[in-house]
Image (spheres, rainbow, N blue to C red):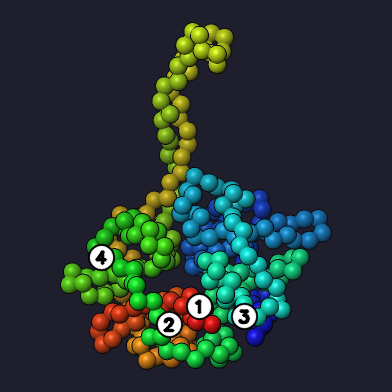
Amino acid sequence: MNVADAMTPREDVVVVELPGTRDDVLEYLQERGFSSVPVVKQTDDSEEYRGLVSREELIERPDEDQLAVLMREVPTVTADESVVDAARLMIEAGTRRVPVVDGVLEGIITVTDVIHAIARSEVELDATAGEIATRDVNTTYEETPLPVAERELYYANAPYAICLDDSGSMNGILTEVDIIEVARVVEGEDDTGDSVAGQDDEWMWEGIKAVGKRYIPTRNVEIPAEPVSMFMSEDLVTVPESKPVIEVAQALITEDIEQIPLVSGDQLIGVVRDSDLLGAL
């Protein structure tokens, strides 16, 4: 199966244009749950693809407002490459979306597009959930303040955390999407302190010895301090080790989720992420 058969074509791709600001892309990340959005620039006779802006950039760089600085370059594919090659590229580059570019942006292929292909048996993947699952599971306590849980996801380099109750049992799941939905950027000021010139300072201007306090504007991402239990998803879908991967893919699509806890009876023993399915290809 080629990328052309699985990708979202350009006419259906949501993009943001340069010059632009973080507000232009935040709407799509918050309201539509996208992981990233392509950035393009209109020229006199065509459209140039420039890069992607993702959830991570918006959270980690709250002081930056310009898309040209927030965006990052990711590898691209062409429409005639195979879906398996595109999946390999996503895994190697650590990205969920790969632009399809041949001079201009022709479309985009995402992890979800590949999962759709697996769910429809358009690419062959003969395995079970237990064979491809990740056994190291990222967790958090359901009463953890959300800002702390966000840092836990960041340091674990994971887009989710299984939420545990007082007995240590699985009681929900928190994802990056849940956090970005309630995050907001707040304005503030930082005091740079006194800046006083001495009589012999080379940088002292005529007659100016003290320029006083200086304040610089700042921007910070504010995340509600309430416990994780207020934001996590409680309706958990789980899979046993014996579940065929094609059925796991179908569940990911049906439930519109990126990972499913792997269980043995009621015991949490792993997690199957959509990226695990790509890795298995």
Secondary structure of the residue carrying numbered label 1: helix
**Of pointers 1 and 4, the one earlier in the residue sequence:** 4
Q: Which residue is mark 3?
A: 83
The residue drawn where x is 65% and y is 80% is 82
Q: Which residue is mark 2?
A: 132
Amino acid type of the residue that numbered disc 3 sits on in the rendered structure: Val
Q: CA distance from mark 3 to mark 2?
A: 19 Å
CB contact under 8 Å: marks 4 and 2: no
The residue drawn where x is 55% and y is 13% is 202
CB contact under 8 Å: marks 2 and 1: yes
Please tell me whether mark 4 or mark 3 is closer to you in this view.
3
**Of pointers 3 and 2, the one earlier in the residue sequence:** 3
Q: Which residue is mark 1?
A: 279
Label 4 Cα neighbours within 10 Å, binned few <14 / some 14-19 / many ≥20: many
Q: CA distance from mark 2 to mark 1?
A: 8 Å
Position of residue 217 relative to residue 10, above or below, is: above
* Front-lying residue, 219 or 74: 74
CB contact under 8 Å: marks 1 and 4: no
Secondary structure of the residue carrying numbered label 2: helix
CB contact under 8 Å: marks 4 and 3: no
| Label of residue 141 in the image | 4
Name the spot of residue 24 as percent of width and height, x first: 58, 56
* Front-lying residue, 118 or 180: 118
Name the spot of residue 111 as percent of width and height, x first: 54, 75
Q: CA distance from mark 1 to mark 4?
A: 29 Å
**Of pointers 4 and 3, the one earlier in the residue sequence:** 3
69 lies left or right of 256: right
Amino acid type of the residue that numbered disc 1 sits on in the rendered structure: Gly
Furthest-right residue in this view:
45
